[in-house]
Image (tube, coloured by chain):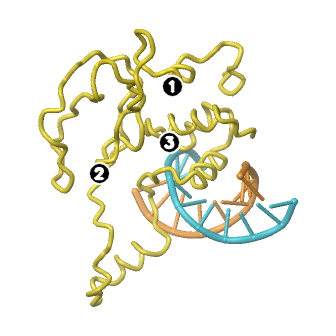
Chain colours: A yellow, B cyan, C orange
Amino acid sequence: MDWSAEAIEQLRALWAEGHSTAEIGRRMGISKNAVVGKAHRLHLPARPSPIQREQAAAASAAPRPVAPAASTAPAVPAPAPRPVAQAPAPVESVARPAAPVLRAAPPPPVVRPFQRSNARSCCWPIGEPGTPEFRFCTSEAFAGKPYCLEHASIAYVKARDRREDAA
DNA sequence: CCCTGATTCGC
DNA sequence: GCGAATCAGG
């Protein structure tokens, strides 16, 4: 696999969209192992794994030892339920960021539309949907497109450069 | 057996 | 750095 900058961007994008590793692999014509391996090396946000090798296993096994100091445990509230979000949808919903994004409290089950900074901003998704960290690219969208130049180049795949997903 | 993602380790 | 093999869970 030639991890060109574009390939990496594509991986990031698909990852951010919440696709499974196997699905990303299928889309890019590589194995899921390649995907997860690269994602891991890129330090992409890990999505809820069906397993945990050490901590959770030990944690669940041990009800609650003592661990007074170690309470710094990442109280990850992130539900991150495999978002159905078709992220790069050119939605023109100019919903203003009304209420501040709550972080600890569980968000309402309703799927609110993604909101970018403003209608002129790139709507390329950054990070893991469903997490407080999730945001949109803050670059300015390019000439009427919903994305900035960089992301438009990825979103609008050039026919000649599609070797990866030539399915 | 199908799926999921994470880690390991030879390359 | 890469990713198949393997692990571990659903």
Q: Quadrant of the C terminus of chain A?
A: top right
Position of C9 compared to C3: left or right? left
Disc 1 with disc 2 on a shared chain? yes
**SS for dot 1:** helix
Q: Amino acid at mark 1?
A: His
Q: Name the residue beneath numbered marker 3.
A: A20
Disc 1 marks which residue?
A: A151
- Residue furthest left in the image: A99
Mark 2 to mark 3: distance in Å? 16 Å
**SS for dot 2:** loop
Which residue is depicted at the point 50% across and 50% down?
A: A44
Residue on which disc 2 sits: A79
Is the same chain shared between marks 2 and 3? Answer: yes
Q: Residue at x 30, y 53 (%)?
A: A78
Which label was assigned to residue A25? none
| Disc 1 and disc 2 in contact, CB within 8 angstroms | no
Give residue A51's position: percent from left, percent from top.
46, 63
Alpha-carbon span between mark 1 and mark 2: 27 Å
The residue drawn where x is 21% and y is 52% is A103
Residue C4 against residue B7 in the figure, above or below: above
Q: Is residue A98 above or below residue A107?
A: above
Chain where mark 1 sits: A
Q: Against A36, is A16 above or below?
A: above
User: Which chain is indicated by disc 2?
Assistant: A
Specify the quadrant that holds the N terminus of chain A: top right
Contact, mark 2 vs mark 3 (Cβ under 8 Å):
no
Q: Of the residues shown, which amino acid type is indicated by label 2?
A: Pro
Q: Nearer the viewer, residue A82 or A137?
A: A137
